Image (cartoon, coloured by chain):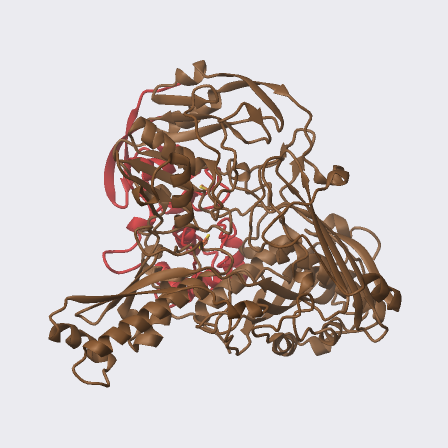
Amino acid sequence: MTIRPQSGHRVDGLVKVTGRARYAGDVAAEGVVFGCFATSDIPAGKVTSVDTTDAEAEPGVVRIWTHENVPRLPKLTHAAAGESLLPLQTDRVTFEGQGIALVLAETLEAAEEAARRVRATYEVEPAQTDFRMALDQRVVIDDWAPLSTSVGDFAAGLGRAQVKVDQSYRTADRHHHAIEPAAVLAIWDGREMLVHDSTQWGYGVRAALAQVLGLPPTQIRVVSEYVGGGFGAKGSVWPYEVYAAVAARELGRPVKIVLSRSQSFTAHGYQPATDQRVILGATEDGCLTAVRHESINPTAILDDHIEHGTLGTRSMYQCPAIETQEHVVRVHRGSPTFMRTPHEGPGMVGLEIAMDELAYALHLDPLELRRRNYAEHDPTNGKPFSSNALRECYDIGAERFGWARRTHPPKSMRDGNDWVGWGMGNALMGTFRFGASARTTLTRDGRVRIETGSQEIGTGTRTTLPLVAAEILGIPADRITVSLGDTNLPEAGGTFGSSTTIGVGSAVREAATQLRHRLNQLAAEPGLQPHEYGEVLALRGLDQLAAEGGWAPSKESGNFAMFAFGAVFAEVRVDALLRVPRVTRLVGAYSVGRVIDPIGARAQITGGMIWGIGQALMESSTMDHALGRYVSKNLTGGLVPVSADVPDLEVHFADEFDPHASPLGARGVGEIGPVGVAPAIANAVFHATGIRIREVPIRVEHLMGEG
Amino acid sequence: MPTGRITITLEVNGTPRVIAVDPRTTLLDALRECLGLTGTKKGCDHGECGACTVLLDGRRINACLTLAVMQEGHRVTTIEGLASGAALHPVQTAFLAQDAFQCGFCTPGQILSAVGCIAEGRATTRETIREGMSGNLCRCSAYPEIVEAVFLAATQPGSP
Ligand code: FES
Ligand code: FES
């Protein structure tokens, strides 16, 4: 199926191309005070004094809080918290970039200038920011998924193997880099706290603020009309959001905090690097006999984040013996967090490069190796897949890419000065499902309004939900509008984990079903037609009719293993002299259940594949471990893909309906796109050059050797 | 540190606007904070992302990289002033036609940059568009669609 854009497809397109879409930082408030944090220069120690004299001399400064005069707050214990210990609540410093003072001032310029003039002295303590230097201090902690799994007899499986791979792989620290820096405006009217926030989870912010402020949730309203990208950074609740609300209540004036780009490096998490070891054993005809995957990542001194790099390996391939193990190492850095794509995003880099190495050890086509190890059910927990069209993805992807024309030996596809390489990798991502609720309201003009406390972060929520309701109600989607991004609307979960269409979409479907049911009851005779809806209201003397609906994953559906799958094919060119790797073609074929909005889904996937290019060739947030801080906290020192980096991209979806993941037949789309791309590119680089790189990003210096 | 405000006149979207600004205020902050023209976005404040792109006397510029006081008397076009009345600018129409955005935050800057890129005569092929538009980051990575939109706007009959 070729998917083409259609004018006006995205229902919020007009406001976005005219600059009228209002993001949190755009909201004005009478009498607003601007907040700006001064942050620690050291990664570990104690603040011994904070001198604010010079800062207070800046005209317009309203208040400066340090650990000595800040209002005391409880720990942020709510599950939505990105960091539990709020800065300024202690003199202890556990990472560079931690807030040590908050300046509140009449103008943005005054706040920023005064924050620069805050002078702190410290009792410096030894710091470790490099987890690779502290691997002996690895710890295992509890999390939502087990940190280790084991099925079968790994030692026996490896003993049976005729061919083995045992290698280590690395992924880099990376940042979300949403183009919209996180912004919050808190307004306290003496009774209600109104918070305009660039958040992926309004209800999460409400709950966390309620806990810290000691207010009932009903007295807090979180609004996010538009969010300028989140990618995970805005999926949890972070200290700047809490302090905006605290300051608004203390000062009795609206308080706005917009992070600077450099603060964004330490204020709301990052994707932690991983060190992985993958051991594969196989028979000489390419059937896996043993798989072991270990992954280790840094986490904060005070907070836990496990990257779960081995999750994909538990479910990807059929194998009688699979062992996985996760560890973390505590370092003096802010807390890592979820970032598109967590878990399998870094984890599949190790597994899929290892599979390519196994294919070469076996003299077997890499795609054929994967076909031979196709899992008919989840190999770790034994559950059947809710639906899995990976084989179809192999067929479509290989066909569209022209994989059959590939010659297997490395360096065998030279074109002029370029070494050309073709590689592939599998994609897999777990399916996250959260309960949600929604309301649908019909008015006499025959239009329907959907209301839900979900958010629009660029994923197209305002466009997808009407398609769901239109199908149930039998009216065109352009007669259906969506209100979202407000905790005064029915509760919905966060816009993360590729979960919105599944959860919120299913709630909308239920609400629309209820609405239709009520209309049928109100109709004079059976066989009510959609064009008669307005007349039914008139007949009954009603101006409008509303119905609510909720959805939560059923218990029975827990009997299935649920994943989005994909197969990614990459072409790279490496100039034989300059050795600069360039991606020239990417084809991805995906199994994501039923695709509700093909145009939006395609955009999600192409955007995700470009993230994969960034992971493969560019993105690495480099630290100076002597100073314990990032080297370049900006968008030029840390590379992300730009238009000139983007090759021809092709996206295909398998024709599929998942009867278990959701009533819509859909699974998640938002985060499968980046998975599998980086290993496909790394494998293509090997095919092009004969040089096997086991870490990403792959850079020109990795390819300077022989080859 | 200077603290007094300086009164300047900018011609913004065809209308002279008199504002009193801190000498440290960038053109970007003047547009957003003094004039309420929040369609121009701040993504980095350091000339790295292009979200703040506006036209200054018809040429594209990063509004975060110039001080408002330096632009006394100059003509500024922002996203709010690009359409004429209800009729969208052809680049805006092309962005809608090609679905050239996701979250929309980089979009005003992309559109103004595209107008500038086309006016510079750089938008002749998809290749030159990719190069000419590479100063505007889109983390949602709507790049393929943006390139198509700029190509469409640059090559359609009667294009700007
Ligand atoms: S805000 Fe001006 S270039 Fe980023
Ligand atoms: S549309 Fe989100 S950054 Fe470009």
Residue A655: image location, x then y, percent: 53, 79
Q: Residue A500: x and y, percent?
A: 44, 61
Question: At x 38% / y 26%, what residue is drawn?
Answer: A104
Q: Which corner quadrant of the image does residue A706 belong to?
A: bottom right
The residue at 38%/63% (across/down) is B94
- Residue closest to the eye, A361 or A285: A285
Task: Look at the picture and state if A139 lies above or below A157.
Answer: above
Q: Residue furthest top?
A: A53
Q: Is residue A244 left or right of residue A361?
A: left
| Chain B shade in the render | red
Residue A49 location (% of width, % of height): 53, 16
Identify the residue at horizontal 80%, vertical 57% (top origin): A691
Residue at the extreme front of the image, as rendered: A555
Q: Considering the image in quadrants, where does the C terminus of chain A appear?
A: bottom right
Work out whether residue A531 or residue A583 is closer to the camera in this orientation and state it.
A531
- State whether residue B146 is above or below residue A35: below
Tell me which corner region of the image, top left, top right, bottom left or bottom right, holds residue A322.
bottom right
Please state the total of marks drawn on the protein image: 0
Q: Quick one: which chain is brown?
A: A
Q: Residue at x 54, y 70 (%)?
A: A592
Q: Quadrant of residue A112?
A: top left
